[in-house]
Amino acid sequence: MTQNTKPTALVLIFGATGDLAKRKLFPSLYNLFTKDKLGSFAVIGIARRTLTSDEFRENVKDSIKDLNGTDENLEDFVSRFHYHSHDVTDSSSYAALKKLASQLDSQYHLNENRIFYLAMAPEFFGTIAEHLKSDHLTDVSGFKRLVIEKPFGHDLSSAQHLNNQIRTAFAEEEIYRIDHYLGKEMVQNIEVIRFANAIYEPLWNNRYISNIQVTSSETLGVEERGRYYEKSGALRDMVQNHMLQMVALLAMEPPIRLTTEEIRSEKVRVLRALRDFKGEELKDYFVRGQYGKGTIDQTDLPGYREETMVDPESNTETFVAGKLMIDNFRWAGVPFYIRTGKRMQEKSTKIVIQFKDIPMNLYYETEKKVSPNLLVIHIQPEEGITLHLNAKKSGQQTEATPTKLSYANKGVNGINTPEAYEKLLFDCLRGDATNFTHWDEVALSWAFVDSISEVWEKDKEQSFPNYVSGSMGPDAADTLLEKDGFHWWPISDLDVEQC
Ligand code: BG6
């Protein structure tokens, strides 16, 4: 239930000396604090390393030094941070943590509201959740919530196992599974664009839409994450979560109310309707790629197999393109094409909704077909919406020329900023789980992805590496659409004009 008053809670961050805490969580909390959105709060930073609270506060200060705020704000903010050096498997360590938590509860009047944020290696998620219960940290009179980062398991069975572990300590409605794409402004805007405009929803179906394309491309490679990525690949890293979540938002039926339960249940229905591809037929629907050497911004870059912690004969995919079919009345016959990859030409996430051609082309533009109408949703780095229309070419009698209506929503902080985390943290503090993934969504997404990875794991891809760093992926990704008479809309041509 969403509260209107400013949220009050003790936030316990496991993994407080890690990258996520430093880059996203501390800046997000600080932004919420300076915007005066928080009630009373305190934070316990928890990690293995031995640190004093003062040293920890210095780390926190360092992570927020570039953000707006007064010195007074900053001191008040960091004074609420406390540090606990912790062994995740040792009950006595949890007992000391419990003591500190109770002390801060009374000191800051936190009503025993607790948020446990697991910002650390997933292999400890289950152990921590079980200890929180058995060592009584979850015995509180206020609310208790668990925030959990991806990856949520490696496949359906490991995700199920993890879920069973965390469910021993937390009820489903107390679990906030982060998918940071759901915190992005324009991803949240999908629902509003669809359900707050009378002009789109009547056209939002297989009668008027020919295909939908969702691209999330990155220029970065695997950086220092080779060990994780080798086991994950683009399919588990991006498709199982972010890509399927965007598809679910695009394809879902209008919920009867904008409540967490209604929205989630509509998304679940989309995931249930995803067509499952068996064995050989997968080739017609999914394409994988792995980057080789190449150049981006005049810098020569190594291929994936040359990256640190990567097997020189690795079969891991760094690119996936797929054609999803949603077998329900609304979407029968409409392909949802998705593609995502590392070391691509540019960093961009865009959704293109391509409308069907007009029944009869009366307007010729130098013998060319009239361009189809496109609705482009710019998720990042630009944020906005563009509607591609045709209008009369000035001066000519009947010729049509493509034109664009653009709405640019200037991103506050650019790419992958604390912005998404700020919103998600605030939602969690207020008890709004809408933009977090429910177990049913996680399970269905894994089941879908497992059926692909099972085929890929058996069948080693012989052509790896099959795309050059700095390109838009392997040729097969283009063929996937060409077979259906479509093509990927070049993302660089679709830029939203700044207003
Ligand atoms: C993460 C993946 O979930 O999303 C990363 O693990 C990826 O591999 C990142 O780089 C992309 O996020 P964004 O917000 O930069 O598009």
Image: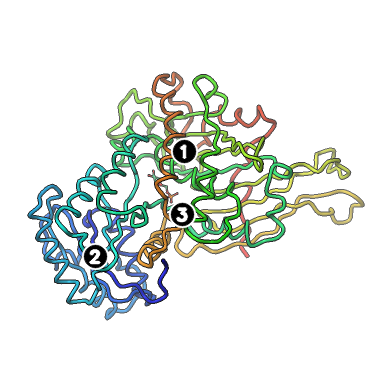
Write the residue at 83% across / 49% down.
400
What residue sits right under mark 2 in the picture? 60
Disc 2 CB within 8 Å of nearest ligand 1 atom: no
Crowding around mark 3 (Cα neighbors within 10 Å: few <14, some 14 to 19, many 20+) is many
Q: Is residue 461 left or right of residue 187?
A: left
Among the two numbered marks 3 and 2 on one chain, the one whose residue lies closer to the N terminus? 2
**Left or right of 56 in this view: 365:** right
Residue 341: mark in rendering: 1
Label 1, secondary structure: give it. Answer: strand
- x, y percent for residue 176: 36, 55
Quadrant of the image occupied by residue 192: bottom right
In percent of width and height, residue 472 lies at: 53, 36
Would you identify the image quadrant in which residue 254 lies? bottom right
Mark closest to the chain's N terminus, 1 or 3 = 3
Q: Is residue 389 left or right of residue 190?
A: right
Tag 2: amino acid: Val
Instruction: Report, in whole angstroms, how far the alpha carbon at label 3 lies from the one at label 2.
Output: 26 Å
Q: Nearer the viewer, residue 126 or 40?
A: 126
- Residue indicated by mark 3: 182
